[in-house]
Amino acid sequence: MDALTSLFKDFDFAALLPPLDTFLGQVAFWTRLALLAGPLVLLCAGLLYFFHPSADPGSRVGFRSYLSTGSTQVWRFAQRIAGMVYIGLGGGLFVIYLILSLFFGVMGPLGMATTALVCIILFAVLVLAAQVLLRMWILRYYDKDGNRK
């Protein structure tokens, strides 16, 4: 045991860790990236759905649900509405989260991670609520077979 202790006597384990300021700078970068990635993807999907919707319900890209694939008319309506909702939700959350991430410089690492986690959970809840509202909106104007009411 003494031989093992003498072997590591002059070894500095702290030298293996990165400098604390570099590590904290990376925490701020990664939490900002995690915070802004979801709204940015949602905004891009909304722009794609609104300005370049796919022509037929059989396409793999688009707002897909049982209701939206009923007919071509419902598909186009769903893409347009989903595009508007996603642009508004993604753009709004991106701006809010960007402003919020500017305050990461005065927060500690735990505060940054906690704030990012709460915002990501809020984002997921809002996207699920948007999905439900989109389906309700489609049902308001179309029946389950894809015919206009």
Image (spheres, rainbow, N blue to C red):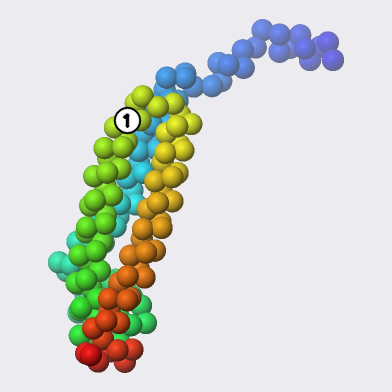
Mark 1: which secondary structure?
helix
- In percent of the image, x 27 and y 44: which residue is there? 96
Relative to residue 135, is residue 116 depicted above or below?
above
Q: Position of residue 97 (x, y in %)?
A: 30, 43
The residue identified by callout 1 is: 103
- In percent of the image, x 44 and y 26: which residue is there? 108
Q: Give 7 or 49, whichever is nearer the viewer.
A: 49
What is the number of callouts on the image? 1
Q: Where is residue 9 in the image (x, y as percent from the top left)?
A: 71, 8
Quarter of the image where the C terminus is located: bottom left
Name which quarter of the figure residue 59 lies in: bottom left
Residue type (three-letter) at the residue carrying disc 1: Phe
Name which quarter of the figure residue 85 lies in: bottom left
Name which quarter of the figure residue 137 lies in: bottom left
Q: Is residue 107 toward the left or the right of residue 73 in the image?
A: right
Q: Position of residue 21 (x, y in %)?
A: 42, 19
Relative to residue 40, is residue 76 depicted above or below?
below
Quarter of the image where the N terminus is located: top right
Q: Where is residue 53 in the image (x, y as percent from the top left)?
A: 19, 72
Relative to residue 87, is residue 103 depicted above or below?
above
Crowd tier of the residue under label 1, counting other residues whose Cα lies within 10 Å: few below 14, some 14–19, many 20 or above = few
- In percent of the image, x 43 and y 45: which residue is there? 118
Q: Can residue 104 be seen in this view?
A: yes
Q: Which residue lies furthest to the right in this view?
A: 1
Q: Residue furthest left?
A: 51
- In percent of the image, x 20 and y 85: which residue is there? 73
Q: Can residue 59 be seen in this view?
A: no
